[in-house]
Image (tube, rainbow, N blue to C red):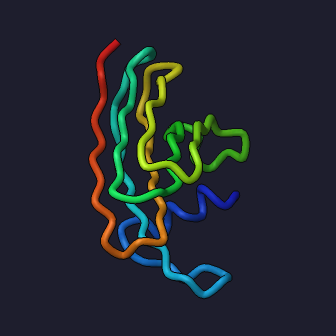
């Protein structure tokens, strides 16, 4: 289990980090097609991860990430269910997750 997949267990609530800060986490699962573009917008800078659901327990799972950004445009490499994980130090994070079909 890596840092990202461990965070899925805390998704939707606040988790305590090793530095003592609480992190807000949001998780969503989407059925997407290869070539679709995932669009994530946040009210503050955060970490945004797109992970293949079919291999979530695999340490070699396909993961696309952006760090310390308030928006991301990630192209989905192949068809399947994808987990979106947003983590932020903000307790009042506003976000939007959408996609543009290929």
Pinpoint residue 84: horizontal percent, then vertical percent. 43, 46
Residue 26, placed above or below residue 55: below
Residue in the foreground of this view, choosing between 79 and 63: 63
Q: In this view, does 78 lie to the left or right of 44?
A: right
Which of the 4 image quadrants contains residue 17?
A: bottom right
Q: In which quarter of the image is the C terminus?
A: top left
Residue appearing at x 47%, y 24% in the figure? 76
Pinpoint residue 18: horizontal percent, then vertical percent. 67, 82
Residue 20, placed above or below residue 100: below
Residue 99, placed above or below residue 30: above
Residue 10, placed above or below residue 45: below
Q: In this view, does 33 lie to the left or right of 97?
A: right
Which of the 4 image quadrants contains residue 7?
A: bottom right
Residue appearing at x 36%, y 34% in the figure? 39
Pinpoint residue 97: horizontal percent, then vertical percent. 30, 42
Residue appearing at x 60%, y 64% in the figure? 6
């Amino acid at each position: 289990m890596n840092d990202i997949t461990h965070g899925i267990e805390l998704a939707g609530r606040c988790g305590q980090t090793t530095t003592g800060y609480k992190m807000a986490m949001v998780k969503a699962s989407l059925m997407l097609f290869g070539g679709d573009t995932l669009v994530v917008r946040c009210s503050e800078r955060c970490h945004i991860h797109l992970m293949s659901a079919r291999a979530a327990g695999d340490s070699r799972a396909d993961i696309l990430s952006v760090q310390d950004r308030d928006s991301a445009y990630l192209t989905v490499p192949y068809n399947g269910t994808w987990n979106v994980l947003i983590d932020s130090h903000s307790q009042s994070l506003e976000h939007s997750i959408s996609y543009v079909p290929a």
